[in-house]
Amino acid sequence: MSLLSMLKGKGPSGFGYGSTAEEVTEGLDLSGKTYLVTGCNSGLGLETMRVLSLRGAHVIAAARTAEKAANAIAQVSANATPVACELSDPASVRACVENVKQTGRTLDAMICNAGIMALPKLETSHGYELQFFTNHVGHFILVTSLLDQLAEDGRVVIVSSAAHLQAPKETIEFDNLDGSKRYNSWRNYGQSKMANILFARHLSKKFEGTQRTANALHPGVIQTNLGRHMGGFVKMLLGVVSPLFLKSIPQGAATQCYVATHPSLADVSGEYFADCNIKKTRKDAKNDEIAEKLWAKSEEIIANV
């Protein structure tokens, strides 16, 4: 148990910083339910798939390649179907959508877990900065294309980050989505995570009057493959402090498993969670005008890629 796990108690939900994915799903029977999880091949996605399967669910396991997804399924002996989904490639995302539809399964939740972080140099896809395109646009295509497969009480769970606090002061730099005017690895990562929150918020507005929900979350700070682009010194430092301050992978997967499955959240939508409890975001993450503008821009982007 980390030092922070001991110092931080449980919140109103009965869970907290130190809760694990197994703990937040304990006693739940997910038999007959199907969950789509992106980034299933390592880290939080792998643990999320393992625990959902442990509770009886079937998982549609998405990774960059079907082979990686299949290997991950075998690694944890999950009840799952492998699908390829390279979020930076719209053709791959759309092929994934068709493969999911062909399973004939209704989705009880879509857990948008995959992502890339803090790319040291500007990279682009289809003319857009790669973190924004992968973390937001890729998931936007996936989710909006699969809404017909979502159960009447289905949930959309978007893994964002406290890094949204580092987003530009403009919230979303609509005039610089290609990163050509200015690029900073962490600010642009923060922008992509801000976009995740705004996406979930506007989707929740579209779900009003239904039993469907959409929420975003911060999983915590965990040493996973997400940080593969960090420098050697930072990686070394994380290795030193990890036992004291970082969440374990089972703890990191807890919030997304909680938001995707817990019966107490059936009517909770448009919120931002951390440590399995509702938490505050940066003020502009609740700006519905910006959220609507981002939605319209996202639709414009996907119509042309």
Image (cartoon, rainbow, N blue to C red):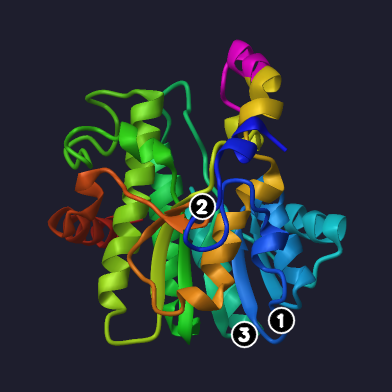
Pointers 3 and 1 in contact (C-beta within 8 Å): no
The quarter of the displayed image where residue 140 is located: bottom left
Q: Residue furthest top?
A: 233
Pointers 1 and 2 in contact (C-beta within 8 Å): no
Magenta range: 228-237
Q: Tag 2 or tag 3, which sits nearer the N-term?
A: 2
Q: Amino acid at mark 3?
A: Arg
Residue 4 visible? The answer is: yes
Q: Residue furthest left?
A: 289
Residue designated by label 2: 87
Residue designated by label 3: 105
**CA–CA distance between discs 3 and 1?**
18 Å
Q: Quadrant of the C terminus?
A: bottom left
Q: Label 2: how many residues lie within 10 Å, few (<14), some (14-19) or many (20+)? A: many
The residue that appears at 23% across and 42% down in the rendered structure is 172
Between circles 3 and 1, the one closer to the viewer is: 1
Under circle 1, the secondary element is loop
Asked whether, in this view, residue 248 is left or right of residue 138, the answer is right
Q: Is residue 35 magenta?
A: no
Q: Nearer the viewer, residue 115 or 33?
A: 33
Between circles 1 and 2, the one closer to the viewer is: 1
Residue designated by label 1: 29
The residue that appears at 81% across and 66% down in the rendered structure is 78
Q: Tag 1 or tag 3, which sits nearer the N-term?
A: 1
**CA–CA distance between discs 1 and 2?**
31 Å
Q: Is residue 178 above or below residue 158?
A: above
Q: Is residue 232 magenta?
A: yes
The image position of residue 50, as x and y in percent, is 76, 61
Asked whether, in this view, residue 79 is left or right of residue 183, the answer is right
